[in-house]
Image: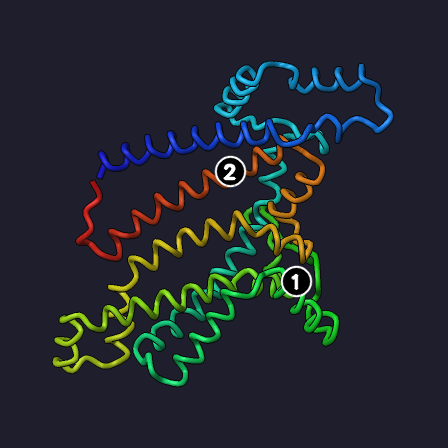
Amino acid sequence: MLKYLLKRLVQMIVVLFTVSVIVFLVMSFTGDPVLMIVPPTATDAQIAEARTALGLDRPLWVQYGVFLQNLLRGDLGVSYIFKRPALTLIVERMPATLELVFFSVLLSLAVALPCGVYAGARPNSPFSRAVMGGSLLGISLPSFWVGILLIFYFAVEKGLLPSSGRGATAPLFGIPFAFLTWDGFRHIVLPAVTLALGTLAMLIRLIRAQIMEVMRQDFIRFARAKGVSWRSLFFSHALKNALVPVVTVFGMQIGSLIAFATVTETIFAWPGMGKLLVDSINTADRPVIVAYLMIVAAIFVLINFLVDIVYTLIDPRIDLR
């Protein structure tokens, strides 16, 4: 196990280094942040002075060397717009995004597990067909359209839930969370449902397919012959053996939800990392964009590593070497 951990650590470092190169190069050839900072009436001399102050007049390889050196120290630059460290801005917005993703994941699992297991156990039943049809619809519908519909019906027409914002928050271990207050919980419902819809639909289809495959295995026939109850057969025997590919996809989906919650956060004005990214793109705030991409890349790498560890907990036969 120690050898595997060291191997994965080296792989993680190589991946993050590669990502840093790609991100830096892409951002270097995408727009000129100086033109977004200086006033429209700025002279050529003022523009050149601003470019020098930001270090953008140096050769590209020198800029990357400075960027990499600062990155190793945990310094991801200072926001051109907010005049604050980019990492601080991301960390301040991270609890809002993680809270939204957590409730989306919780909702997805609560619905997908029972529906997927039952649809896989009874693939020809009317309920299974309805679930599959609904999951196909959930995969096909774009999240921005779903969010707008939910706002129109539940916020505008019925007035049951707020349409935007995070609402009131309460501290937990010094970190503000919305779900700890009734007002904040009401604010999180619509964006969580919007964000969960695609993941929910994908998980249902995946769990159904895996359950159908496992139900054809010999050990399931033996369990039936021994008189194991249907509930125990599905949720203890079949589901456990079907979880390995599900965990793989689900782990990547968590990373995707964190990285690509930008649309949902923008629609509902949810003050998370995604909303900050969209605002930074509009203002060409390069340090914030780079910091966001590097943090998300690190999250993806970490989740991928944790998924490999979870494999061994689900199926002890898997040997990590």
Among numbered discs 1 and 2, the one appearing first in the sequence = 1
The answer to which of 318 and 94 lies nearer the viewer is 318
Q: Quadrant of the C terminus?
A: top left
Give the distance between the C-alpha atoms of the residues marked 1 and 2, in whole angstroms: 26 Å
Question: In this figure, which residue is indicated by the disc labeled 1?
Answer: 187
Say which residue appears at 46% left-offset and 70% top-offset. 135
Q: Residues within 10 Å of mark 1 (few under 14, many from 20)?
A: many
Secondary element at tag 2: helix
**Which residue occupies the extreme right position in the image?**
41
Say which residue appears at 36% left-offset and 76% top-offset. 119
Q: Is residue 275 left or right of residue 131?
A: right
The answer to which of 131 and 26 lies nearer the viewer is 26
Q: Is residue 235 left or right of residue 285?
A: left
Q: Is residue 61 above or below residue 18?
A: above
Q: Residues within 10 Å of mark 2 (few under 14, many from 20)?
A: some
Question: In this figure, which residue is indicated by the disc labeled 2?
Answer: 295
Q: Nearer the viewer, mark 1 or mark 2?
A: 2
User: Amino acid under label 2?
Assistant: Ile
The answer to which of 160 and 238 lies nearer the viewer is 238
Secondary element at tag 1: helix
Residue 76 rendering spot, x and y as whole percentages: 57, 28
Q: Is residue 163 left or right of residue 1?
A: right
Residue 249 rendering spot, x and y as whole percentages: 38, 55
- Identify the image quadrant of residue 190: bottom right
Q: Is residue 260 above or below residue 1?
A: below
